Amino acid sequence: MATQTKRPRVAGHVDGGDPDPVAGFLNWCRRVGLELSPKVAVSRQGTVAGYGMVARESLQAGELLFVVPRAALLSQHTCSIGGLLERERGALQSQSGWVPLLLALLHELQAPASRWRPYFALWPELGSLEHPMFWPEEERRCLLQGTGVPEAVEKDLANIRSEYHSIVLPFMEAHPDLFSLRVRSLELYYQLVAVVMAYSFQEPLEEEEDEKEPNSPVMVPAADILNHLANHNANLEYSANCLRMVATQPIPKGHEIFNTYGQMANWQLIHMYGFVEPYPDNTDDTADIQMVTVREAALQGTKTEAERLLAYERWDFLCKLEMVGEEGAFVIGREEVLTEEELITTLKVLCMPAEEFRELKDQDGGGDNKREEGSLTITNIPKLKASWRQLLRNSVLLTLQTYATDLKTDQDLLSNKEVYAKLSWREQQALQVRYGQKMILHQLLELTQVSSFPVP
């Protein structure tokens, strides 16, 4: 497994490292009732890089790897200022919903008697985090142009700054006895947001709770040591009193144990966790076609002002149906279109004869919505109507123009091991993100061929 799949980890944290952080952490686990199977080990040996968890002995599917009691979780409720955070809950509401946990971390990191100090010793060095939010802006835009990451990061940075200055800093200044001057830092706050992005867990809601707000993130010691793979071999299970990490497939002795952070495309992995899975390992990879790009492709196909106005009218109708939006995207996976309903409805409305559109609009979007063309899996795309395929193809071509490099340029970099090895770590990660997306888009080009439009 290539080292790029590993989140960079360095012993130590905001207060400096422990001479033997693993031993200190294991002693802490015993004190708080966090039980590790004797068949697993926290180690730097046998992992893709830095700390990880490996099998001391062969493990079978279903075997318990470790149990984390809920009292050992670090959250806004279990931290030493949990009562204050609960009382001030109304004032700490934010768009992210993360402010209480972040304040808990800011307090515990600088509290000399914090019960979490041995846990923090296994955290990454905060200055070494590789999220694109810490890359120079020009490098981020140059390497990740077209991937969607620079735009996501800019939104994050703006939200983090706003959250810090309007909520977090005033709260810390109102409680100077709980927050030392050295943790009243926007830079540290950025770093802790990245830690919560990469290392926290959000307990899924029960089916009957779907209408509720998502659960707040929590830090789960031991579980956050495991790294992510799409083809993972362990999974975290939640119960009333504890969280249990369980093997999902046989794990041979000496092999690393990998959790899953969810079905994450490479652009999401680098954005939230600071690493990617090299092509073609990430079977959950996706490519986005911006919804407004499909609108642009439809407008390019108009010949008269009347046709142009009709295209806008169709788009407004799709907006009313909540199928499209100015900032939305159609998400294409390797095997299927993840936004199937939205894309198939959009292609249908934008391509249908004008008279048929008028009838549909008169019905206010009602009527027969059956999928004449079948499910929009990748294999079914060639079966779409020629006009639909043409519009989808033109949208893909416009999307490919947003990247700074073409597929062949990236392919040449990847296929030349000597050249690839000379790239910086960031250049390698960004290349993997771009290449995976372009491979999906080029597959779409092949599948949307219309006889008079050969694949470039």
Image: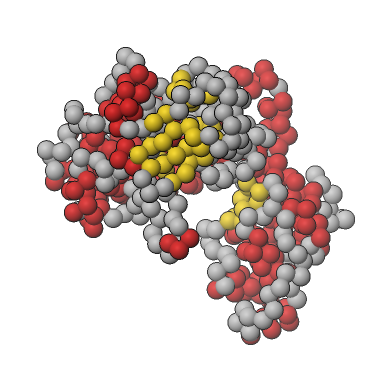
x 71%, y 73%: residue: 370
Residue 114 location, quadrant? top left
Closer to the camera in the image, 108 or 222? 222
x 64%, y 73%: residue: 314
- The colour scheme used here is secondary structure
Residue ranking furthest to the top: 19
x 23%, y 54%: residue: 89
The image position of residue 259, as x and y in percent, is 52, 36
- Image mark count: 0
The image position of residue 194, as x and y in percent, is 39, 38
60 to 202, vertically: above or below: above
Residue 71 location, quadrant? top left
The image position of residue 321, as x and y in percent, is 57, 72
The image position of residue 30, as x and y in percent, is 32, 27
Residue ranking furthest to the left: 177
Left or right of 88: which side holds 188? right
191 to 52, vertically: above or below: below
The C terminus lies in quadrant: top right
Q: Is residue 420 visible?
A: yes
Q: Is residue 131 visible?
A: no
The N terminus lies in quadrant: top right
x 26%, y 24%: residue: 15
